[in-house]
Every structure is written in structure tokens, then in C-alpha cells.
Image (cartoon, rainbow, N blue to C red):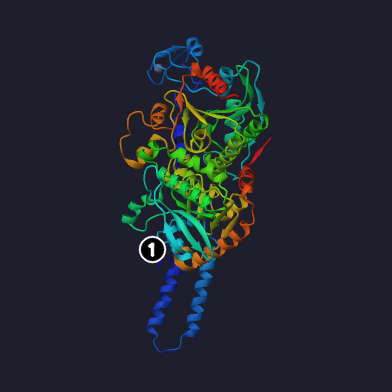
Amino acid sequence: MAWFKRSTDNIKSDSLKKDTPDGIWTKCPDCNDVIHKKQWEANLYVCSKCGYHFRIGSEKYFQLLLDEGSFRELDRKMKSIDPLNFSDTKPYVKRIEDTINKTGLYDAIRTGTGKINNIDIVIGCMDFDFIGGSMGSVVGEKISRAIDKAIKTKYPLIILSSSGGARMMEGAISLMQLAKTSTQLAKLSQYKVPYISILTNPTTGGASASYAMLGDFNIAEPNALIAFAGPRVVKQATGKDLPPGFQRAEFVQEHGFIDFIVERKDLKSKLTQLLNLIKD
Amino acid sequence: MANITLEFEKPIVELEQKIDEIKEMSSGMDISNELAKLEKKVIELRTQIFSNLTPWEVVQLARHPERPFSLDYIFNMTTDFIELHGDRLFGDDKAIVGGFARLENRTVMIIGQQKGRDTKSNLYRNFGMPNPEGYRKALRLMKLAEKFEKPVITLIDTPGAYPGIGAEERGQAEAIAKNLFEMAKLKVPIIVVIIGEGASGGALGIGVGDRVLMLEYCWYSVISPESCSSILWRSWEHKEKAAEQLKLTANDLLELGIIDRIIPEPPGGAHRDHVLAAKLLKKTLIEELDQISKIKNEKFLENRIEKFSAMGFFKE
Ligand SMILES: [Zn+2]
């Protein structure tokens, strides 16, 4: 399936780096409202008019969720190599280097330990800005190690997903990361360590067909696109009009795959509440 | 057989036809010397062509419409097959078949993706593209196998999980994810065989096991060469290059540690001789089952974690 297509399509004007020319105003891609940057930041990058949740990356989520100074990053500098010697319009090696230089990130996920209102957790957060949040060897390995950490410490595991799917440039190896992360989660579940999956916009393809859908609790941000095959692919394959709200968080919840939807401003308190409930 | 001839198969088929013609015209005459020479030439030509196949040619062989499909292997390898239907939740997906059968002296649970051979049967089988209920049926059958302590054999042959509206509504992603999770824990042996096309999550949805085997002329990857080409090069024209880049052939995947073993196909490919293809697969499966039945039940999860955890290339 063309998991990757949507990831590039999905990079639209809501990237935090694309500001309006004067850098003071930003435009909501959903309702076209112009928002002052200060207000936008204060509102956690959610449109105050229509509630549109702009995509934010790991740095902002860690700030939002974790107690100040509690984050200890794991495997920060783990990097992709190029096992297939892959080259399309650009060699994969070059694509990685360029993306590292552009984003300051090393791959599409960051993992670590931290505290949420004083509750110890293991956390992973994907970065869509890194090649469409695509899952290759590094994402698979970092999640796998985060799971090992959760087993060792017995801290609950939280993963925030934002991904267009598996990373094509790693071929079948990227596909195997679905199996790798899912078999590791099978182990985690045997130790009865809680796993909370938070699905943000978009969570599609390989991520949704593995760890993102396997939470003891699947939580979504409002209106997040959650799919196996994205809407474009479905429309192309079926030639049919898609139902209203198709593959959006509310639609996916209505069909039974999401426990609850929570606005960004309430995410930390809701997680605290849930973690306290399942703590012994 | 072999009514449909791929471009690179043509020289072989033409020579074979020539031999048939000579045989027909030479009634009574002794031409055995001549024939032996020509038949030797066929073998040489075939060896030469098949040892130099490009990845794209392998993809074409994997999709050959006359290739044996899951049910062909099941009927040619096993006896007493009883097909079991339905996921007990929504329906019965015709793109995945499965049931108990006897493989020589063993009962096995055999599950495979099933393509159709003509338009009508392809519509019935949804071109081998499963819906969520197919993956859920497969899981139900695997749990049955676990209950009755029978090994599981899965046969992968799909162009992908179906990207339909209903499939999305009923949780295609969840169905596949759940299978990966549950297959990891299954307390009976699982042997996975790629018998044709192994496209992406739709293939992997029945693809977690203790041993992953692959027939000689199959492909297995995260995306089809056509889709890869259309995304990365914005056109389908680079499908041959994409096929090369993706390293999707059995030899490549063996080298990368994604599969454990390559199963030989009959000369000229499985589509040339269904019975022999099944015989070769059966022989391998019996060897593998003999080996694997020595593993203790509680070791399966541990072994599968170890197997799949090793897959990945990175630096620190
Ligand atoms: Zn808005």
C-alpha cells in the first residue's frame, strides 16, 4: 500500500516552521482564521476559533506533558544507516543527513523517561517533520528499547504517534519494525505494565498497523487522521465518495477503536487521572 | 499449462513449441538424437534466463496468473483438508482461506491468502486483498490450533490489505496489529511461507512466525514497486528501478536476515508445474516441522522476540 503518499501530502501549511512572512501571525489551515503567534503558543498550538490541533513535535509534547526537568532522553543519537543502498531522487543517506540538519532531530522518534505530575513513565514521541514520521530501523529499535526500559522499571509506557507509515527506503526491514514493536508489546503485556497509545494527526500505515493501535488505552487528539490506508488511497481504490468525517478520530472512536478523545490542553491532567486509576 | 507467457519466457516457450512440432512431424523417423540436443538447449536457455532474472522479472513471476495459489498448495500437499469459515464477528473473508489438514502424518492448521484465477474468481477472492475479517478469521484459526496443539502454516500471497471504506471502518489497522501481537505469543509453532506476492502490512498480518520461508520467485517488501515508483518518482515508469532498490527478492531478503530459507521452484517457475512445486514445498515443511517440534512451548514468545528484534540497521 502507498503508505508514504499521504505523509508527503500531509505536510501542508500547519508545520510550525512555516510562518507568515512577518512571523507574528499564523493561519489556521482549517478555518483560515489568522492567529497571533503569542496567542497561538499560549493556546498550545490549537486554533482558538475552530479547535484545529496544529501538529507539534516531540519537544513541545515533552514540555507539555512532563514535569519540568524530569525528561531523561534515551538513545538520543541513534541514527539510520542505509542497509539497502537506496536512492530515489536523492540518496537515502543524503536525505537523512539533510533532515538531521534541517530539523535538529536524529530520527522520527525520541524516547526517554520522565514524570507526569510526579508519576514515573517511559515516553516516546514521534516527529512527523522527520521524513513524514516514517518508521524505519531507528524508530523500531528505540521503541523496542523503551519497552525494555518499561519492563525493567515497571513504569507505564506512553507513545505519541504521528506517522505516515513505514519508511520505504528501508524496504522489508522497515516492514519488519511492525513485527518487532508488536512482539515487544506482547512481552510488555505479560509483565502487566500499562501501555497508553496517543494517536495524533496523522497516524497511518505501519504505525497504526502496529504499536499505535495496540494500546491498553488508545487515546486520540481531536480530528486526528487515523487510518491504515489514507483517504486518497481509499478513494482511488474504490472510486467511491468517502463518508463525512471518514478516518478522523471521532469517526474511528465511533467505530470502536479509540477509548477517548482528549483536547491537547487536557492531555496531561487526563493522563494523570488515568495513570492514578490503574496504579496500585 | 503456461498459456500466458511473460516476455522473458518467450525464447524458452518458442523452443519448446518447436520441439513439439518436430515430434509431431517426424512420426516413425528416429530423431531422438536431434530431440535430445534440443531439449538440452531448452535447459541451458532456461538456466541462463532464470539465473539472470531482474528483480522486476521476479515480481512478474510472483504475480503470474497461472502460479499455484494457496488452495492449489493445500490440495496438492495435504489430505483431509476441512476449510473453516468466518471470524465469528462480522463475516467470512474469501481472500483468506484456512482449516485443519493432514500434512503427511501430522495435523496442521494451514492458512493462506487466496487469489482468483480469472475475473470472476478474482472478484470473489477480492484479488487476494483481505479485509479485517480475514485477519480476524486467521487469528481465530490460529487460536484453535493453539488449543489443540497443532502447528500453524501460513501462506502469504497478497498485493496488500484491501484499502476499502468498510475495511477502514472495521479497523484494518487494528486487525493487522492485533495479529502481530497475538502471533508473537501463540504457543504452537508457526511457519510462514511467502508463495507469491508479499505486499506490506497486508502480508505481514499473517507473517509473524518462528521460521519465515520464501519460494524462489517471490517478492516481499513494504510497498509494491509501482506504488514506490509513483510516490518517490511521481510516476509508475520507474517500477523496475524501484524493484531493484527495494531489495525484494528471496536472495536479497535472505542476505538481510528477513527470511530464513529459500525453497526451490520447478524449472521455469512454480506455474510450470503445480504438482512439483507443492512437492518441493511439502518436503521443506516436513523438515522444518521436524526441527521445530523440538522447541518447548514456553520458548515461542522469547524466540520470536529475539528473531524480530534482531531486524534493523542503525548506528549509535
Ligand atoms: Zn481554525
Residue depicted at x 46% and y 38%: B173
Q: Name the spot of residue A179 as percent of width and height, x first.
A: 56, 42
Q: Is residue A20 visible?
A: yes
Q: The C terminus of chain B lies in which quarter of the figure?
A: top right
Q: How many marks?
A: 1
Q: Is residue B108 above or below residue A106?
A: below
Amino acid at pointer 1:
Ile
Q: Could you tell whether B288 is left or right of A246 in the image? A: right
SS category of the residue bearing label 1:
loop
Q: Label 1 belongs to which residue? A: B4
The image quadrant that residue A178 belongs to is: top right
Residue A80 lies in what quarter of the image? top right
Return the residue nearer the eye: B164 or A276. A276
Q: Nearer the viewer, residue A128 or A149?
A: A149
Q: Quadrant of ligand 1?
A: top left
Residue A250: horizontal and vertical position, in percent?
40, 26
Location of the N terminus of chain B (image quadrant):
bottom left
Residues packed near mark 1 inside 10 Å, few (<14), some (14 to 19) or many (20 plus): few
Q: Position of residue A53 (x, y in %)?
A: 45, 20
Q: What is the x, y in percent for residue A197?
A: 52, 29
Q: Is residue A60 left or right of residue B127?
A: right
Whether the residue carrying mark 1 lies under 8 Å from ligand 1 is answered with no
Chain name for mark 1: B
Residue displayed at 33% across by 52% down: B124
Examine the rendering and report whether any part of residue B69 can be seen: no
Q: Is residue B278 depicted above or below B297 in this figure? A: below
